[in-house]
């Protein structure tokens, strides 16, 4: 493999590891705020008990996200100097906005949120929880502004090969931002929903019958059941937007080669063949592709063959990778839909977590990190689907890579992979440890508190 491929794998591995943790903290911050507000409204200690456990998960995920994010900035300079040389006038300020408006907000109030529950007034602690949740969302907003602009750039002009901003509002509110931002927030919500349900099911199976587990389980199942239909709708809108601005990506997602073909079938299974430029072993539903993508039974969409120049240069992404990652994302989403709706039915019928069959509890444990699978598959679809462009129509990936020996990139790549494997093992082990300790009713060394929020109940109960 050459330097370009190795650098792409290295950056992909870096972001794949990093994205796991913001995907949790973005939505978990709002779930913690929900727990806190429910506790203040009802005085029921189960909400504070749930808060106490899940704030540890938030703290651990936040720390992992910060540490893993630092290495990405290094790679802009070491592996991709062409990126900043050509579009640094736009990417630099957007990354700076993220640091100034979001990261500082999180850093200032995170300490109050983690350690101030018994040291500051309840309203201040709730405010800190809100600001941390808001900060994580703002951080995601600025990162997605840059990422969306790389997919649908506007508000700039090119002078001597360098992009200069001409309209910051057009840059920030570029055409794909609304869909990409909402799709990502919903993905975060679903990731947290199944993490809540998965760890709660694990604690329940270990004999934990506390009210905090019941509250977290019901919150996770309800959140998943509510968000997944919304995600399917937003995902469809996102697909239509992508078809308008990046039709080659949609053609790869659908395994659609011939742009003159109408109606377009929906390909359920196939082995895209880049050499013969057709699908092997295709299983498809006639008309359905046209209906979903154009809302017409005989609608046409551009095919992959439309993105090959007369001299044979291929200007569409690698088909098989995009085709399969898209299907993994959709299949995981469908599994989430079935699981969460079935669980809602059982819980309403059986009046709570006791109504869930034991196999379903094991199923939630198995799907505790299913949000990560869907998020990574969706991210691969989006980012690989942008190739061969780094900034669509502006800068090719091959023109931004550093001129360094492939062996040097391979060495650092192996080092990154070893560290990431160790860290992800430690992260999951710590979560399992926290859940197992909580299931035994034993305090952990961090944030030790009594169960059921007794201290907080006393704090908000008027003196007799």
Image (cartoon, grey):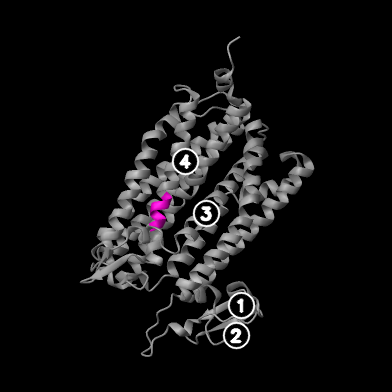
Q: What is the distance, in whole Å, between disc 3 and disc 1 at their CAs?
A: 30 Å
Q: Residue at x 56, y 37 (%)?
A: 34
- Magenta range is 140-145
Position of residue 302 measured from the top left corner of the image (x, y, whole percent): 50, 81
Q: Residues within 10 Å of mark 4 (few under 14, many from 20)?
A: many
Position of residue 142 measured from the top left corner of the image (x, y, whole percent): 38, 52
Q: What is the distance, in whole Å, between disc 4 and disc 3 at their CAs?
A: 20 Å
Q: Which label sits on residue 133?
A: 4
Task: Residue 293: name its quadrant.
Answer: bottom right
Pick whichever of labels 1 and 2 is earlier in the sequence.
Answer: 2
The quarter in which the N terminus is drawn is bottom left
Is residue 274 in sight in this rendering?
no
The quarter in which the C terminus is drawn is top right
Secondary structure under the numbered disc 1 in the rendered image: helix
Q: Residues within 10 Å of mark 1 (few under 14, many from 20)?
A: many
Residue receiving disc 1: 290
Residue receiving disc 2: 262
Q: Are marks 1 and 2 in contact (CB under 8 Å)?
A: yes
Residue receiving disc 3: 372
| Side of 150 relative to 456 (left or right) | left
């Amino acid at each position: 493999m050459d330097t370009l491929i190795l650098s792409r794998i290295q950056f992909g591995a870096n972001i794949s590891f990093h994205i796991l943790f913001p995907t949790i903290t973005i939505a978990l911050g709002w779930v913690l705020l929900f727990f806190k507000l429910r506790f203040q409204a009802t005085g029921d200690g189960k909400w504070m008990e749930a808060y106490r456990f899940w704030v540890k998960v938030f703290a651990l995920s936040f720390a992992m996200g910060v540490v893993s994010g630092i290495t990405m900035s290094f790679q802009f300079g070491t592996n991709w100097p062409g990126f900043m040389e050509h579009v640094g006038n736009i990417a630099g300020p957007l990354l700076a906005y993220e640091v100034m408006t979001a990261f500082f907000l999180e850093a200032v109030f995170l300490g109050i949120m983690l350690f101030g529950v018994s040291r500051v007034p309840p309203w201040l602690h709730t405010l800190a929880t809100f600001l941390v949740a808001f900060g994580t969302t703002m951080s995601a907003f600025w990162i997605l502004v840059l990422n969306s602009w790389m997919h649908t750039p506007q508000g700039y002009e090119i002078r001597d090969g360098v992009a200069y901003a001409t309209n910051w509002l057009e840059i920030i509110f570029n055409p794909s931002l609304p869909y990409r931002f909402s799709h990502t927030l919903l993905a975060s919500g679903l990731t947290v929903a199944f993490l809540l349900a998965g760890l709660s099911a694990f604690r329940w199976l270990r004999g934990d019958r506390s009210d905090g587990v019941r509250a977290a389980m019901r919150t996770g199942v309800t959140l998943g059941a509510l968000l997944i239909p919304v995600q399917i709708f937003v995902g469809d809108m996102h697909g239509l937007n992508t078809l308008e601005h990046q039709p080659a990506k949609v053609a790869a997602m659908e395994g659609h080669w011939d742009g003159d073909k109408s109606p377009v079938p929906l390909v359920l299974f196939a082995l895209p063949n880049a050499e013969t430029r057709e699908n092997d072993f295709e299983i498809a539903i006639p008309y359905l592709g046209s209906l979903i993508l154009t809302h017409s039974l005989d609608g046409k969409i551009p095919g992959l063959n439309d993105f090959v120049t007369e001299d044979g240069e291929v200007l569409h992404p690698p088909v098989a990778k995009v085709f399969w990652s898209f299907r993994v994302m959709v299949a995981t989403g469908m599994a989430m839909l079935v699981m969460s709706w079935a669980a809602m039915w059982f819980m309403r019928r059986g009046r709570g977590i006791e109504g869930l069959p034991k196999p379903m509890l094991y199923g939630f444990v198995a799907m505790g990190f299913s949000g990560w699978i869907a998020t990574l598959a969706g991210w691969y679809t989006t980012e690989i689907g942008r190739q061969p462009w780094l900034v669509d129509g502006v800068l090719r990936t091959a023109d931004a890579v550093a001129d360094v020996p492939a062996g040097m990139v391979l060495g650092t790549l192996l080092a990154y992979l070893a560290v990431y494997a160790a860290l992800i093992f430690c992260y999951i082990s710590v979560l399992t440890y926290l859940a197992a300790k909580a299931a035994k009713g034993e305090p952990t060394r961090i944030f030790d508190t009594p169960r059921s929020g007794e201290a907080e109940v006393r704090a908000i109960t008027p003196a007799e």
